[in-house]
Amino acid sequence: MSMQLTNDEKAMRDGRDGAAVAKAMDLLIRYGNALGAADFVETRNVCGTVTATTPFMRDFAMAKGGFDAVFSEFNLDTADVVEVPQVRAKSFHLQLGFDPNHPKEMGVSEETVQFYRRSEAVVARMGVNMINTCTPYQVGNVPSFGEHCAWMESSAVVYANSVLGARTNTEGRESTSAAMLTCRIPRWGLHLDENRRGQVGVKIECTPQSNEDWGLLGYWMGHWVQNQVAVLDGVQHQPDLASLKHFGSAASSSGGVELYHLVGVTPEAPSWAQAFGGNPEGEVRIYDAQARAQTLDKLNGQTQNTQVDYVMLGCPHYNLAQMQRALELLNGRRISERCALWLFTPHDIKSQADAQGLTAALEQAGVKILTNSCSAMSRAVPPGTRVVALDSAKQAHYLPAILGVQAWFGTTAQCIDAACTGVWSHA
Ligand code: F3S
């Protein structure tokens, strides 16, 4: 059955608002029909990727006549080149494929950066907020409870759904671009009440204390539940933003978790029963010290070499409190000449760190502060890197697979000790 369209949606499809909006509606209707969606929800909050950062896109633009051609082909899925209009929805740009302020470290040519800059200027003129981060919720985009959104980026999606109670599926480059122009996204998946109810349960007997602990719990849970909605009970302390960021990003790496409920913490889980919302409870597993230890073994089991070449912090992108904590953990020490420490944060947060003197203090100790991207996205690490140390289970999941390096996963304190000594310590 085809999607039900309002008169406004039919008019957009039929060209009332120009060729680009018509192409965007056509794309969304094809997408919604393929998903079996009955109709659209209105969204005024979209996070996606619009700019062009690859030599392939640069060559495509040069051959076809500019950025409009790139947007038409890769964002609206049409070979017809349409002029790109202003966005209608409140729209935000997610992380990039590199940090354009550090082309040497990122291994990209000046020419590629120049092409990116031109595409950035066009996209900003369209009305897209260039936050360039995987953590929109840290730099001003905090959707309200129940708000329908269209977001890409798995770690941001799980945070929006679970911690904020907003409603989004994990969208793609094309669907978010079309949503920016039309304020529409198909009503399916996590936009619907019935898909937000708990399906399986976790009883936590080993309460997470540090971000590392939250990452381990998330990694364990994601591996088990895959894309089911889990209800977790037994948290003794109110977790902060960084803990929940590490938890969700780990769960969406080892599995396809887009929504979880933490009883007494997240907004759709005032109680165990309410989080299930009438669904049968399904399987309930216990997370205990043994499960934690096995998960840590799984993440660290392939790594033998304790000589660490590179420490990466900032997956998901660090906030000011985490940068401050990194400085405290350095405690006057410098990064070893045998090692490098790169810290990734949104450029808006770096501006605040600059103003507070935090950037200068970290750089004095030998830390390199980068923005807009990360090692997994950019595939960039310091030259000669064989062994990395990470405080993010998500990055520990991806980086060895992407770059063939060995990875240690541990606490931020362990990572900073490794950066200062060049050696990983299990203590
Ligand atoms: Fe962000 Fe990169 Fe991690 S984009 S969530 S820092 S893999």
Image: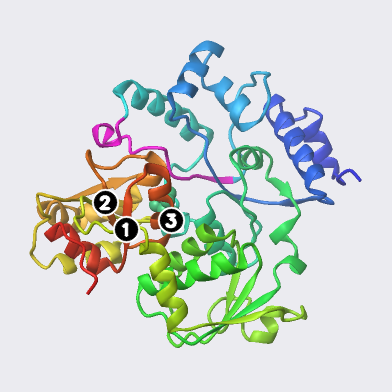
Q: Is residue 334 magenta?
A: no
Q: Which residue does the image show at 75% across and 63% down from the upper left?
A: 192
Q: Which residue does the image show at 47% across and 84% down from the upper left?
A: 288
Q: Secondary structure at mark 3?
A: helix
How far from the left and from the top, in percent, is residue 219? 48, 66
How far from the left and from the top, in percent, is residue 41? 74, 53
- Mark 1: give few (<14), some (14-19) or many (20+) Cα within 10 Å: some
CA gap between label 2 and label 1 equals 8 Å
Quadrant in the rendering for residue 317: bottom left
Q: Which residue does the image show at 26% across and 46% down from the upper left?
A: 386
In the image, the residue with mark 3 has its CB under 8 Å from the nearest atom of ligand 1: no
Are the residues flagged by discs 2 and 1 in contact, CB closer than 8 Å? yes
Q: Quadrant of the C terminus?
A: bottom left
Q: Is residue 293 above or below residue 59?
A: below
Going from N to C along the chain, the mark reached first, 1 or 3, is: 1
The amino acid on which the numbered mark 3 sits, given as a three-letter code, is: His
How far from the left and from the top, in percent, is residue 82? 65, 21
Going from N to C along the chain, the mark reached first, 2 or 1, is: 1
User: What coloring was used for the rendering?
Assistant: rainbow
Q: Which residue is mark 3?
A: 397
Q: Which residue is mark 1?
A: 303
Are the residues flagged by discs 3 and 2 in contact, CB closer than 8 Å? no
Q: Nearer the viewer, residue 271 or 127?
A: 271
Q: Which residue is mark 2?
A: 387
Q: Is residue 151 above or below residue 103?
A: below
Q: Which residues are magenta?
A: 90-107
